[in-house]
Image (tube, rainbow, N blue to C red):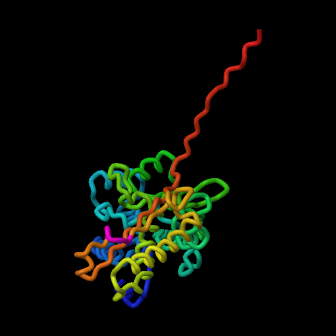
Amino acid sequence: MYALEEADLFNLMCVSPFTRDTDVASTTWDAALKYCKDRRAMLIVDPPNPSTGWSKPSQVTTDSQAGTGLFTLRDENAVIYYPRVKMADSLQENRLEEFAPCGVVAGIMARTDAQRGVWKAPAGLDATLSGVRELAYKMTDGENGQLNPIGVNCLRTFPVVGNVVWGARTMDGADLLASEWKYLPVRRLALFLEESLYRGTQWVVFEPNDEPLWAQIRLNVGAFMHNLFRQGAFQGTSPREAYFVKCDSETTTQNDIDLGIVNILVGFAPLKPAEFVIIKISQIAGEIQT
């Protein structure tokens, strides 16, 4: 994992088990999550092997209620998908075998990022699982409704479209937690902004810390945010409703200036995915003819 120290940037981490019959150790998951948080990346957590862990959704909800197993990893930088996937194994004469889903899901995220942007949830009917023949467990709508509120994203099979990702919550996204980082695209957009602004403001180092610098920062960061607004990354019909950039004597006080610090405050209104479709039907009474 720490070979990534040589990489300039990464934003998704998968930790595949050594074999199909073993699970990643909890200490490894803990270390991976800490490393992802330090590097502003998301950790894609795999469900345990069905023979030793989650063979059906009821076992997932039991672990969630007890706060045991993988649910000790509840964090806004972690995301989990269930169940495992069945694919052709090229090392076993292309026979159908079960695999951890992290690699497939990471591919879905990369494809969605390229086609729509990091602010689009990597889920839905267009998030088809390429190369996946079938899923290790075929869930019903009711079972999906049990796992979604506890922050577990489901892989589903639907007629015509086939196998798709059907969830976009972080592991901190359980309804009871009421986290501001409930949704995966919102959290990934925030991480993208953090990393981009960190890299894009390196030029301010050793510049005179006064209003001319602050005005230049507002201009540069504002241009970056406005470009994202035009691409549809934020809520709102105008830039004022979608984001703000503040860098002035209020954010950077004289004490900050004396310490060599310039403070930049950036806010954005995120787009949250539509998880549910509510349809209301009313009956129109016929007019009475007289």
Quadrant into which the N terminus falls: bottom left
Where is residue 107, by image quadrant?
bottom right
Residue occupying the point 48% across, 75% down? 219
Q: Position of residue 43 (x, y in %)?
A: 39, 71
Where is residue 195, by image quadrant?
bottom left
Asked if one can make out residue 2 in the rendered structure from this viewpoint, the answer is: yes
Where is residue 230, by image quadrant?
bottom right
Q: Is residue 7 above or below residue 48?
A: below
Predominant SS along the magenta part: loop
Q: Nearer the viewer, residue 211 or 159?
A: 211
Q: Nearer the viewer, residue 16 or 285?
A: 285
Q: Position of residue 225 (x, y in %)?
A: 50, 70
Asked if one can make out residue 137 in the rendered structure from this viewpoint, the answer is: no
Q: Nearer the viewer, residue 152 or 69?
A: 152
Residue occupying the point 41% across, 80% down? 212
Residue at the farthest front position: 211
Q: Position of residue 84 (x, y in %)?
A: 47, 64
Segment colored magenta? 247-251
